[in-house]
Amino acid sequence: MRIGFLGLGRMGSGMAASLLAAKHAVIVYNRSREKATPLAERGATVAGRITEVTDADAVITMLADDDAVDSVVFGKDHLLAALPAGRTHIAMSTISVALSERLTQAHRQAKQNYVAAPVFGRPEAAAAAKLFVVAAGAPAAVSRCRPIFDALGQRTFVVGETPATANIVKLSGNFLIGAVIEGLSEAIALVRKNGVDARQYLDLLTSTLFVAPVYKTYGGLIVEGRHEDAGFGAALGLKDIRLALAAADASRVPMPLASLLRDQLLTIVAQGGEALDWSALGRLAAKNAGL
Amino acid sequence: MRIGFLGLGRMGSGMAASLLAAKHAVIVYNRSREKATPLAERGATVAGRITEVTDADAVITMLADDDAVDSVVFGKDHLLAALPAGRTHIAMSTISVALSERLTQAHRQAKQNYVAAPVFGRPEAAAAAKLFVVAAGAPAAVSRCRPIFDALGQRTFVVGETPATANIVKLSGNFLIGAVIEGLSEAIALVRKNGVDARQYLDLLTSTLFVAPVYKTYGGLIVEGRHEDAGFGAALGLKDIRLALAAADASRVPMPLASLLRDQLLTIVAQGGEALDWSALGRLAAKNAGL
Amino acid sequence: MRIGFLGLGRMGSGMAASLLAAKHAVIVYNRSREKATPLAERGATVAGRITEVTDADAVITMLADDDAVDSVVFGKDHLLAALPAGRTHIAMSTISVALSERLTQAHRQAKQNYVAAPVFGRPEAAAAAKLFVVAAGAPAAVSRCRPIFDALGQRTFVVGETPATANIVKLSGNFLIGAVIEGLSEAIALVRKNGVDARQYLDLLTSTLFVAPVYKTYGGLIVEGRHEDAGFGAALGLKDIRLALAAADASRVPMPLASLLRDQLLTIVAQGGEALDWSALGRLAAKNAGL
Amino acid sequence: MRIGFLGLGRMGSGMAASLLAAKHAVIVYNRSREKATPLAERGATVAGRITEVTDADAVITMLADDDAVDSVVFGKDHLLAALPAGRTHIAMSTISVALSERLTQAHRQAKQNYVAAPVFGRPEAAAAAKLFVVAAGAPAAVSRCRPIFDALGQRTFVVGETPATANIVKLSGNFLIGAVIEGLSEAIALVRKNGVDARQYLDLLTSTLFVAPVYKTYGGLIVEGRHEDAGFGAALGLKDIRLALAAADASRVPMPLASLLRDQLLTIVAQGGEALDWSALGRLAAKNAGL
């Protein structure tokens, strides 16, 4: 297939490379153009402006946040006007339910297809085509995107025909990761303050009840107090919890654990930890315990 | 070895059976004597009073709560007085750090050994000798208990020389399970209210990020709304979170997520759900969302 | 002065009447025109469309929420275009900090004045000209509004030159009222469940430590379980706490008590209590305690 | 009347002086005897041991915490044994509901009277006989204590015949004060970070909606960041919130705002602020906001 790709950050670069590896034709665009160079070397066409990527079967956006997607789609020189009728916009970054609903409506009016397909996985998984794709949209449109999803991930879950459904699932998943981190943060502070070796404790947890990798990954970062090299920053985590809470508010679902996560991440960011990994929740719990 | 065993509830019965299966000599005692019958058929000696179980290398207590252990050990006709010097009391039920510390001191004064060895696992795991044992105590004493732990579980973790350390680890583990349940409860309420199929959602979670069995077990109960058959009751869950918070308070560790769990479980119990499984946190989250 | 007045709800009607009583010339507009009739009888001019109220020294908006103000100011047939340069828009309803900032900028560009002047007080106080006015804006503009504020309230507080400052103060004040209600709700549930007479308890509180009328008013509603006749609805309360949290998020201030209020109010609304007074927090606390 | 008085801390010294001023005969006892000297100068008899104070119509305990009362009443050389039948123990310090229930039972068995009569007021109010007394117990016993209460406070509230009722009321009152402090702490952090003058803001609050002295007192301490001179220490506040939560737990009343207070006070204490006034909640809120 011929695929336009907008957004070559840590996730997007790996994903575009995976598409190329699967022999798709890829036209990439990024505001800072030098990020496109490694992909050009692997065969990508580099577009000089957003509207050049629309000469494609589908255009993927993998941009930082709502504002970036909003401006690319609705801003001047915009995707919405440039994309021919019948083509598909696949929004793969983590965006709000509200924006996904606006995109659904706008693309429908423009007789274009819109598929929401956020992904689970960190940059390493993106580069290795090991993402999990959560897709939602009109069945025919989703079906046509299958080869793309197959090239990007190890498995695709279609969760509904309403695109925003996929965004809800993605946001709830990030909330659950946040809950794991906060739980581990408090538990590790407790056992450390009671003289238990934190590393041995984590080994016990992850070889018995909590074998999921997310416990190993984040537990390890907390035990080592290693939060400076942000795989997923506190500010990003805060953004996603905020979006989960906004969706919960709009659909009237109280989520007190999400509120707690919001307050703790906001504390980290307010105290200057914006650039820390969101596992810095562990540092906050330790600090609050006087450790 | 010759082992005294006090407390033949759902966990204790399976554990005593595992000891017999491993060819240990077991003397059991239970307040309501009929629970001892199936074990007698497998070769256990049935004691008529608590003090008769003390003619053993070690005596295991697997009793409901602090009060039960307190009364058995310190009450009239009590273990503390009856147990010969040099023998070992292994406290395997989930008790408070404070009681474990009192036991440490009392047994030391009586020149007996005391090992705290709470377990992870539900009744099925107890019956199948698949528990995880978390042990702490004087190395020599713990070492002598090894054959017992090997007969009961699939793996033993020695977490320190201070017995109460094992209780902290056990309580923190139950807290982490509670955190999983609350997280799933809120996430499932959110996605259900947004039109996502909850069963499919759970499959997605447990085949990607959250492969640990605890997610499958409790997620399944929440999705099905099946809380009547309590594997682990809300009142017990509340008790354990209360003990975790007491230990946290004593060692000055704020645990806001544990506080949240406490308040939610207390709501369930206050509204008459004492006998429900603690996965009823899912029902509470649904009800609070108007589902 | 000649004053345009938009929004004749329970608060606005009383305020417009106070302005007439103070001999100001008042041109009123309301979507449902019949609400203007009683004011016409007292001497108000009734405008047939929004733009007719702009032939005035100042135009007051006292509308339900952000959306209403947004649509009146920025919508088609809008205040922003119709208001002559040099005139003043006084936004007196409770709006978001973000909207107040947008208004600041838009009116500045249009060479109009903008003063934020939200008020404290319930409808009775509005009708009796007993409101407290919290004003912020350019000193000269605020100064010219003085006769208006004097006609509406018993006292005016000027809190800064940045209009949004007044909105922050207003939102934080509503948050503090919400905190009083939640505190009383929990305390009253506790004492009732322990056999204390709730009415006598409230008398004790309000004649000793908590003499502020807000304790008497809301405590009385909670004790009587009288939440059907909403002086200030749960949905409005939720909206204001949401705006307080949005302002707190934007300025990076964790407010866990506000988060708690949000979750409790959201529960009330999700369970169908949208139209109840926000003192229904008391009913929720009682229900959660099994009362 | 002839009154025994145990506990000459900041509160107790003022109270004993008030009793002397009202012409009661007072026998005082304090562990560190020098605290009795000023009272001896005003006419108090100084007892050398606890049991000497029991030659009185009533004995008041005004001791630091549960442990102190427990040890004085039930310990060796104890009040329970020394107090003649028919005499009255008035427990006036803030103790747990559980201890008050134990005292009720023990004194009944010893055919003594027991009245719980905790007080509201800071040391200045104790010295000025301006306390509020909250009493509960058998009507005849309470009635006989009236002259004592009249000498100590400006008003007495009899809240029931079950002594522990008075303790519930006292604990819930301290919880409500804590709620005020936390509310103010968050609100002040919010407005400060948005450029509002905190002192002016507090004046606005306390001259409009929140005229109760508790807002002025604690708001002032927060605005000035003056927490070193503890009128009521964070550790004491934590103790009282803990007791309120214990009573709430025992009677199955979820109190999420009390849980929040517990976690915040625990953070202060864990970080070394044990000796700070509990208004240090304001410092914590400011710190968490990066101020």
Image (spheres, coloured by chain):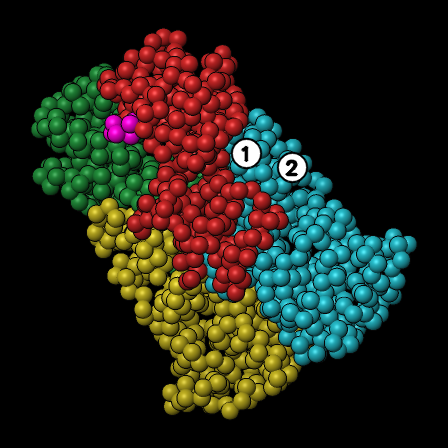
Chain colours: A red, B cyan, C green, D yellow
**To which chain does the residue with label 1 belong?**
B
Q: Nearer the viewer, mark 2 or mark 1?
A: 1
Pick the quarter of the image with the N terminus of chain C.
top left
Badge 1 local density, few (<14 within 10 Å), some, or many (20+)?
some
**What residue is pinned by disc 1?**
B208
Position of residue A260 relative to residue B44, above or below, is: above
Main SS category, magenta section: helix
Q: Amino acid at mark 2?
A: Leu
Examine the rendered structure and indicate whether residue B40 appears above or below residue D152: above
Which image quarter: residue A290?
A: bottom left
- Residue at position x 54%, y 53% from top? A202
Q: Quadrant of residue A55?
A: top left
Which percent across, then down, holds residue D44? 44, 88
Q: Are marks 2 and 1 on the same chain?
A: yes
Query: Counting other residues with Cα less than 10 Å from the Cα at mark 2, is it few (<14), some (14-19), or many (20 or more)?
Result: many
- How far across and down, in percent of the image, does residue D125 sit? 37, 71
The residue closer to the viewer here, C27 or B205, is B205
Residue D111 pos. (x, y %): 67, 77
Would residue C175 be seen by someone viewing this image from the given angle? yes
